[in-house]
Image (spheres, grey):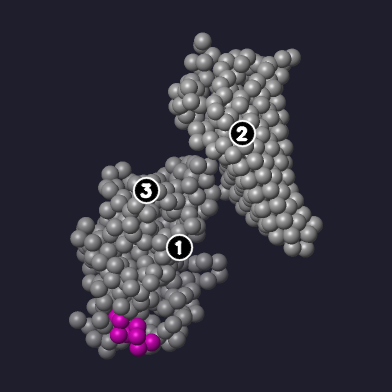
Amino acid sequence: MPELQSMADALRIVGEDPMAVLGPDSAHLVAYGHQLASMQSVPGVTVLATSEKGVIHARVVVAEGRQIVQPVHLCFGMFERFGAQVVELDVTLEPGSSATLWSHCLFTQVEKATHAMTARIEVQADASLAYQEVHYHGASGGIEVVPRATITLGPRARYKADFSLVQGRVGTLDIDYTVDVAEYAVAELTSKVYGFGTDAIRIREQVNLNGEGARGLVKTRVAAREHATAEVIGVTHGNAAGARGHVDCMEIVRDHAVVSAIPEVKVTHPQAKVTHEAAIGSVDSKQLETLMARGLDPESAIDLIIRGMLT
Amino acid sequence: MNSPAQLAAEQGNRGSDVGARAGVPAAGALLELRGIGLRLGVKEVLCGLSLAIAQGEMHVLLGANGSGKSSLAQLIMGCDGYAPSTGDILFEGRCINALPIHERARLGITLAWQEPARFEGISVRAYLALRAGAGDPAHHLEAVGLQPSEYLHRAVDKTLSGGERKRIELASVLALRPRLAILDEPSAGIDLLSMDDIVRLIGAMRVAGMTVLLITHQEELALHADRASQLCGGRIVASGTPVDVTENYRARRCRRCDGETCNHA
């Protein structure tokens, strides 16, 4: 199937081994456009999907108490020049379970297309989910990607999400994620995006610390150059005793790019505490001079600093 | 060998300042500073400074806090805002005033900052391999007293303590094998027990053929040098053997400051 070959090639671009992703012991779902190419459940992980009326409905359930060692892979691709892909994703980690979920969104050849994802993720009591979302949007800059997610963490649950789009063009990216955190649960969201050309980046991530002792971190790293724009909105609300949250945003701007960071912290309980830090600007001059004093020319030094920040 | 009295006798045109012999190894000097002035804002940080350092020499620059030592280091390296307002920086007889930092680095000059920068996402292994053919990074870490297995995979970021970061900076100088290594307060922030490590490390740099300009306010380090100079009030006020210059520095003869903090720069 040529599309599967394209998917394998795209996976290699983002550093993945297609044989590991699509192997017999790996729970996975592979879809290009609205076609379901491969789907597999493994003991402890149920993967179900349908495609109808221009929407992929996917559901992943990790059974209660199961500790899944092999990552679960969700691969969404488009290998036509024009098109659209709409995905509704439902992920549930039942109590006491743990898993790593890799979501690969690979749009290598698109010229003008849209990918819209609406996800509902529930990490139930004492469960743990590491969610790695890696995007590659090709070189055209003509794609619009609109991920939406509502994430609910039960008591003592742990959720660690990493969003990465640091190769190729971004196109238009509009992320909006909200996490509700119950007592003694921990949410950690990290996003790393590198935009150039006329890329337009908007990232809004909100963590609501609703339970006693809830913890949240929203960390964003964005580099923008040429005529790219970026708007980063990190929101944390401390709504319970002992809740602790932090918003950490760093953006590097070059050329004619325009970036903004809007941290919003709100506390509704006297024993909650939320802090934020934001740094926007050019590459730090001391970092730059240090690398230049090791013989790197300015362009190479800046590239190394930015790549490091986005690693 | 010049005694403090002899040094004091070389007052030149600086009134009651202790005298300076600036250009002893000028013939064949690797680095020569001629009449250097530096303005930072309205402040004249360096004025008429002259100094020459021979190939293979370890030269210590002593001076109280605020005397202009770090400014001089950044001026030699070519850092932004530290261009000399007067005078010339000569490297092997060539004026390098107009060269940017990386071109000076490619000539063989490097600087280990007093407060080294930190980098998100750059591993110690990568940092020690910035120069092609930099050699085994584990070997360089061992030379600064760090266990490679504990550090090579770590990032050169804020999770390192001040002392750890400083040692990695020195390891990176070893890896670079520059012709002239400017070490700005290498022992600051490192515990006293490891002062011997630094002395050994500088010895290793010299064995590797590096010329070292060691900037410090710690007299103990100065005694390991070939020659020493004292900076005060933006100029060299004494130059000579480490023993003589250290004695002069210890005597706090300078009238501009109390010997601990120079109010000039």
> Which of the labelled discs sits on residue A233, or is there none?
none
Nearer to us: label 1 or label 2: 2
Q: Where does the image place residue A8, in percent across and percent down from the top left?
A: 48, 20
Q: CA distance from mark 3 to mark 1?
A: 17 Å
Q: Residue at x 55, y 66 (%)?
A: B41
Tell me which segment is drawn in magenta.
B245-252
Q: Which residue is mark 1?
A: B161
Q: Which residue is mark 2?
A: A63
Q: Which residue is mark 3?
A: B125
Assign a secondary structure to mark 3: helix
Q: Residue at x 30, y 67 (%)?
A: B198
Identity, as a three-letter code, of the amino acid under mark 2? Ala
Mark closest to the chain's N terminus, 3 or 1? 3
Identity, as a three-letter code, of the amino acid under mark 3? Arg
Question: Can residue A115 be seen in this snapshot?
Answer: no
Q: Main secondary structure of the magenta part?
A: helix
Q: Where does the image place residue B221, in percent across and percent down from the top left?
A: 30, 74
Query: Around disc 3, counting alpha carbons within 10 Å, would you say few (fewer than 14), some (14 to 19), or many (20 or more)?
Result: many
Q: Is residue B125 magenta?
A: no
Q: CA distance from mark 2 to mark 3?
A: 41 Å
State which quadrant residue A225 falls in: top right
Task: Name the chain letter of the residue that bears numbered label 3.
Answer: B
Does label 1 lie on the same chain as label 3?
yes
Tell me: residue B45, above or below residue A28.
below
